[in-house]
Image (tube, rainbow, N blue to C red):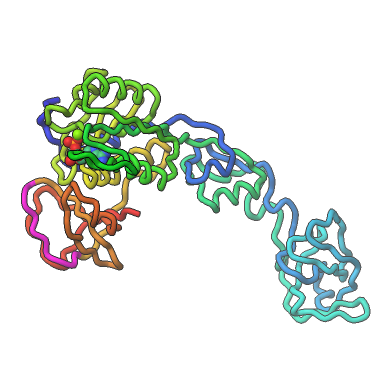
Amino acid sequence: MDSNYMVSIQEAIELVNTHTNVGTTTSESLLNALDLFLAKDTFSTINMPPFNQSAMDGYAVLYDEQHQNNFVLVDEIKAGDNNKRTLEVGQAVRIFTGAPTPTNANAVIMQENTAVADGILTIEDTLTNNKNIRLAGEQIKKEELALATGSKLNPAAIGFLATLGITSVEVYQKPSITIVVTGNELAEAGKPLDFGQIYESNAIMLQSALLKKGFNNITILKVKDNYQATKESLHTAINQSDFVLISGGISVGDYDFVGKALLELNTQQLFYKIKQKPGKPLFYGKNGNTNIFALPGNPASALTCFYIYIEAALQQFIGNPNYKKQTISLSLKDEYIKKGIRGEFLKATATGKEVSILGSQSSAMLNTFANANALIYLDEGVGTIQKNTTVTTYIID
Ligand code: AMP
Ligand code: MG
């Protein structure tokens, strides 16, 4: 591909979507599977509930046409009792929530609607078949599908599988990720700055963005603006990771070696530049099954590219069927004069149905990004946007 060819934002999203692979699957304990996606249909090995169960504290009865008001009390069953008894018509047992009802009981009456005197239960309630009884298998029957492939293991899903006695599940694995940071000018926080230096901040920023989404298998490599060193670091990163995120060195300067090194390492380039602001020099490519994003070093560009392209790719890798980043339509609070033909992502704050553009949109600055909870997307062709126009917005959290 011509290295000057710029793809549109939509083309870039589409290329990432087409080329990102879905990761391998693995068996994980339920807790470790939190927020991952099922790679296999998961079936129940039991009926749930496993037995007819009382839904109330009260009395279980066997009633018929003739026996509707008074019952002879014959037993008590509390939760956990291993009592498989039956009743004769006209009999009742004291029962508590979660306890097994006598196998032929046909109603449970809540205790608030009863009175007991001399071993006789009197009820003031209408009886209907199986009232207040949770029937065995009512929630799910043995061998029925519990959760389908692609289901997200949120806390409710984990709880549901735990009620079925399931301890581990087959899920798509989280990716291993290497962040490669380039730049001679970068100093470590905590040390005084020499003239010409700035503090390195992209590694910890990208690491935070990854950790926030549950991606914790992260290695960080730091490299100077030196072709050989860059190539070696990238070689290591590619060999050890499912994703390589590179910061800086992808632009057109004489000391930007990332693009050359990636191609030298036989990386398949899918795009190198995007018609967008910020983040024009964004490289995406594949090296075997490794997904490679080389991000501009400017911090706001790097983070914007993370939210728009990388987050979706990571979700796709872990088998999320809804991996595409969702947008919402909000009303723009202020007029915006858009110059230039590139598409734009603007740092913004969304409140209710409105969104307002923050100051200092510079790709080198994070001061207002720190207060943003949204990115407004403006398409390539768009010019000045009037106040109250509906704009497409990505929520970043
Ligand atoms: P580059 O993409 O390497 O040309 O860098 C673009 C700008 O981002 C330069 O001003 C760099 O100093 C700055 N920059 C690059 N990498 C980092 C980093 N890791 N942390 C903070 N700023 C950076
Ligand atoms: Mg640089």
Q: Please indicate, yes or no, whether residue 355 appears anywhere in the rendered image.
A: yes
Q: Position of residue 77 (x, y in %)?
A: 84, 63
Q: Nearer the viewer, residue 83 or 304?
A: 304
Write the residue at 89% across / 66% down.
Answer: 75
Left or right of residue 101, residue 346 in this image: left
Q: Which residues are magenta?
A: 332-341
Please give the name of the residue rendered at 57% of the width and 44% of the height, measured from the top-left corner: 31
In the rendered image, the quadrant that contains the N terminus is: top left
Queried whether the magenta region covers residue 340, the answer comes back as: yes
Q: 17 above or below 60?
A: above
Query: Which part of the image, by quadrant, shows the C terminus?
Result: bottom left
Residue furthest right in the image = 118
Q: Quadrant of residue 227?
A: top left
At 37% from the left and 33% from the top, the residue drawn is 220
Residue 95 quadrant: bottom right
Dividing the image into four equal quarters, which quarter contains ligand 2?
top left
Q: Percent x, y for residue 300?
A: 23, 47
Foreground of the two, 371 or 328: 371
> Which quadrant of the view contains residue 373?
bottom left
Residue in the picture at 79% in, 79% down: 114
- 260 sits to left or right of 116: left
* 199 inside magenta stretch: no
Q: Is residue 183 left or right of residue 340?
A: right
> Does residue 13 show up?
no
Percent x, y for residue 382? 10, 53
Q: Main secondary structure of the magenta part?
A: loop
Q: Is residue 215 above or below residue 345?
A: above
